[in-house]
């Protein structure tokens, strides 16, 4: 409050006092004490009302107590049920949550983790995979710029994501404490760690297989590895393990003799005293096909997008990409290719367009600043481009009504802009736009990426260059290129296919590994080929003995989805039916046995100990969990902070002043009424 405001308050007090005295002492009535009482009440009312009109502000200081965060992260995977006592686990969680000293010192947030992180509701210990690295990354993002520590209740075994030791090391200032579940003793063990194999192989060819095996123990042991399919041995190898030479990679080739999904099992012999024999075998599969799709990319200018297209397309082993400059393209290349991608076409592409139109072949056109726009307007009927040589940076905006094919896992939020031609682009006929252009946050309605079938063959068109940045952004967002590569694969699959559009489209894999949810997705369109989000789709799954699963498919915002989480290993067929029009789609898949959470019968104490030491945390077994809690409480690193918050509060916010005015006026009225002054 300033000095001038203080002067105004004094003047208002004088005015209020003068008014009150004038009212009751100008023509005295009744006793002096009564008049003094009424004058006082009137002074309070008038002075308070005048203060509200002036509405001065006052500094108000409040104190906020900020406690450091303690994040309690509980492993909710199936291995916890196998290695530990679930009742003891749940009791340990309750003890930490209800610890009085901890609650006074920390704000305790409890989470569960497996493949993802979730707030703690219940512990089921039935999740099929564990990703400790992702939980560490998630906590670091949630509690960024906050003081916090973590307590993990886990066996330390991770089978998904990065090595959590190195992820934790990136933020070593956050202490990682571990309460260990499971046996920490090490037993002699031979195991199959990993099998690397291509998802697809080609008929009458050989395909490579890599088997990584390891030994835990102090002896020298002989090991034999056999690979079986349909009850017969197709490969065998021997090696010797010791305490120092404890890993070995077997590399060999197998023959692809029969079309379809072929399943194999690799087995390493058991040791006489071996405790865990579950990890002595592992199943794998490959799908044997006739041939790869050949994609021809024709370019007139070099650009980083060309390399990214090749990498993304060939991430699907079914596809082979040939990059070819326009000067070296032959008729044979065009005829043998399943799809031709035209990168920034100009007048030198005229012969290419003539042959593509003559053969009615599908194509994928990418238009950039080096394209000849007048030439493109004359040589095709799909779109009309502006006659502009100017460029602009455009960001993608996903069209949620896109229905040509299913698109999952990528939303294009915050993706870098592409370099596009300036001006309005007009599409001919019923083209389906996947991405619109957005400039400086403004939706323009201009197409960026879309598909069409109006001229007979299928065509994909992209009006911008720079998608190499999108692939990099996908890696920054998700830690891999999978979402972007899948997106490109969907575009290639659509544009390379001659299959006519159907009203019920089902997407699935030919085989799934056990421990990973079997997901089947579908899209349903009405008679005008408009996606219908209100359809009723039913899925039935059959094994050799009959029906094993039946359920409605759930709409998840863009597709209908069925997650099959309890299927036994084996061969299955399924049928998806749209009840409204009696449309059905049939398919088949194979479930490959692999209980990933049963591969370890011991806790990974060594890794957890390294992480706790490198980050300044503590580690103890679950029966000594109190020692971890005591060490956290004794640490001087975590302190409660009391923060003073000073703010200017206007007088009108003080409700008690309004109450005072009402009380004083009411009291004055009753006294005057009682004494006959009214």
Image (tube, rainbow, N blue to C red):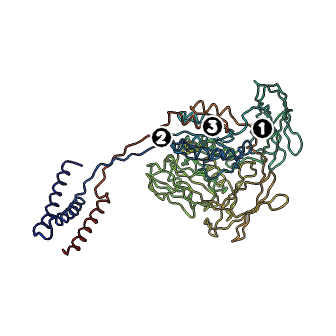
Which comes sooner in the sequence, label 3 or label 1? Answer: 3
Q: Is residue 613 above or below residue 200?
A: above
| Marks 3/1: CA–CA distance | 37 Å
Residue 55 x %, y %: 25, 57
Residue matched to label 3: 178
| Marks 2/1: CA–CA distance | 46 Å
Residue 299 x %, y %: 58, 44
Residue matched to label 2: 145
Residue 346 x %, y %: 54, 48
Closest to the camera, between mark 2 and mark 1, is 2
Q: Which residue is at 74% across, 32% downward?
A: 185
**Any mark on residue 209, and which?**
1
Q: Is residue 281 above or below residue 240?
A: below
> Residue 357 sits in which quadrant?
bottom right
Q: Which residue is at 46% across, 48% downward?
A: 393
Mark 2 element type: loop
Circle 3 crowding by C-alpha within 10 Å: few under 14, some 14–19, many from 20:
many
Circle 2 crowding by C-alpha within 10 Å: few under 14, some 14–19, many from 20:
few
Which of 170/672 is in front?
672
**Any mark on residue 77, and which?**
none
Which comes sooner in the sequence, label 2 or label 3? Answer: 2
Which of 186/636 is in front?
636
Which comes sooner in the sequence, label 2 or label 1? Answer: 2
Count of labels shown?
3
């Amino acid at each position: 409050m300033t000095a001038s405001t203080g002067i105004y308050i004094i003047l208002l007090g004088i005015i209020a006092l003068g008014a009150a005295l004038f009212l009751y002492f100008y023509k005295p009535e009744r006793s002096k004490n009564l008049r003094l009482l009424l004058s006082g009440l009137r002074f309070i009312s008038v002075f308070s009302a005048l203060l509200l009109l002036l509405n001065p502000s006052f500094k108000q200081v409040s104190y906020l107590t900020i406690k450091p965060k303690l994040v309690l992260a509980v492993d909710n995977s199936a291995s916890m049920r196998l290695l530990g006592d679930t009742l003891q686990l749940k009791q340990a969680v309750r003890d930490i949550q209800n610890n009085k000293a901890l609650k006074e010192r920390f704000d305790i947030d409890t989470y569960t983790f497996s493949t993802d992180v979730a707030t703690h509701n219940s512990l089921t210990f039935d999740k099929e995979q564990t990703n400790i690295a992702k939980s560490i990354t998630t906590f670091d993002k949630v509690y960024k710029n906050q003081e916090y520590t973590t307590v993990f209740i886990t066996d330390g075994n991770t089978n998904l994501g990065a090595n959590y030791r190195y992820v934790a090391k990136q933020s070593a200032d956050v202490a990682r404490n571990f309460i260990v579940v499971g046996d920490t003793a090490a037993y002699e063990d031979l195991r199959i760690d990993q099998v690397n194999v291509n998802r697809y192989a080609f008929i009458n060819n050989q395909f490579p297989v890599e088997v990584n095996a390891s030994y835990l123990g102090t002896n020298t042991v002989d090991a034999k590895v056999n690979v079986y399919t349909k009850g017969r041995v197709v490969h065998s190898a021997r090696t010797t393990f010791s305490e120092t030479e404890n890993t070995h990679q077997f590399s060999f080739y197998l023959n692809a003799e029969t079309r379809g999904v072929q399943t194999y099992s690799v087995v390493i012999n058991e040791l006489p005293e071996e405790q865990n024999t579950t990890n002595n075998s592992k199943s794998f599969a490959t799908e044997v096909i006739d041939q790869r799709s050949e994609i021809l990319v024709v370019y007139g200018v070099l650009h980083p997008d060309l390399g990214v297209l090749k990498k993304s397309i060939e991430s699907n082993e079914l596809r082979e990409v040939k990059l070819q400059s326009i000067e070296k393209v032959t008729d044979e290349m065009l005829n043998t290719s399943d799809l031709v991608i035209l990168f920034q076409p100009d007048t030198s592409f005229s012969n290419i367009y003539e042959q593509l139109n003559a053969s009615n072949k599908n194509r994928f056109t990418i238009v950039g600043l080096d394209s000849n726009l007048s030439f493109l307007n004359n040589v095709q009927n799909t779109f009309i481009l502006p006659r502009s040589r100017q460029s602009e940076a455009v960001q993608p905006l996903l069209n949620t009504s896109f229905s040509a094919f299913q698109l999952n896992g990528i939303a294009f939020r915050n993706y870098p802009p592409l370099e596009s031609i300036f001006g309005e682009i007009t599409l001919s006929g019923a083209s389906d736009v996947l991405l619109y252009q957005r400039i400086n946050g403004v939706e323009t309605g201009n197409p960026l990426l879309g598909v069409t079938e109006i001229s007979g063959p299928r065509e994909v068109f992209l009006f911008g260059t720079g998608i190499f940045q999108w692939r990099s952004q996908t890696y920054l967002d998700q830690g891999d290129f999978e979402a972007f590569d899948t997106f490109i694969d969907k575009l290639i699959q659509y544009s390379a296919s001659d299959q006519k559009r159907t009203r019920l489209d089902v997407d699935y894999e030919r085989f799934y590994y056990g421990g990973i949810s079997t997901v089947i997705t579908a899209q349903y369109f009405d008679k005008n080929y408009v996606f219908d989000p209100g359809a009723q789709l039913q899925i039935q799954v059959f094994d050799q003995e009959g029906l094993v699963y039946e359920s409605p498919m759930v709409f998840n915002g863009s597709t209908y989805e069925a997650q099959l989480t309890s299927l036994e290993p084996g061969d299955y067929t399924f049928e998806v039916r749209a009840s409204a029009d009696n449309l059905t789609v049939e398919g088949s898949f194979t479930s490959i046995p692999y209980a990933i959470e049963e591969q370890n019968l011991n806790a990974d104490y060594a890794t957890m100990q390294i992480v706790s030491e490198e980050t300044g945390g503590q580690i103890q077994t679950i029966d000594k969990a109190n020692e971890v809690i005591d060490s956290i409480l004794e640490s001087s690193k975590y302190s409660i902070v009391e923060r003073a918050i000073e703010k200017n509060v206007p007088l009108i916010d003080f409700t008690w002043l309004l109450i005072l005015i009402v009380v004083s006026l009411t009291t004055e009225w009753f006294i005057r009424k009682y004494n006959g002054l009214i």
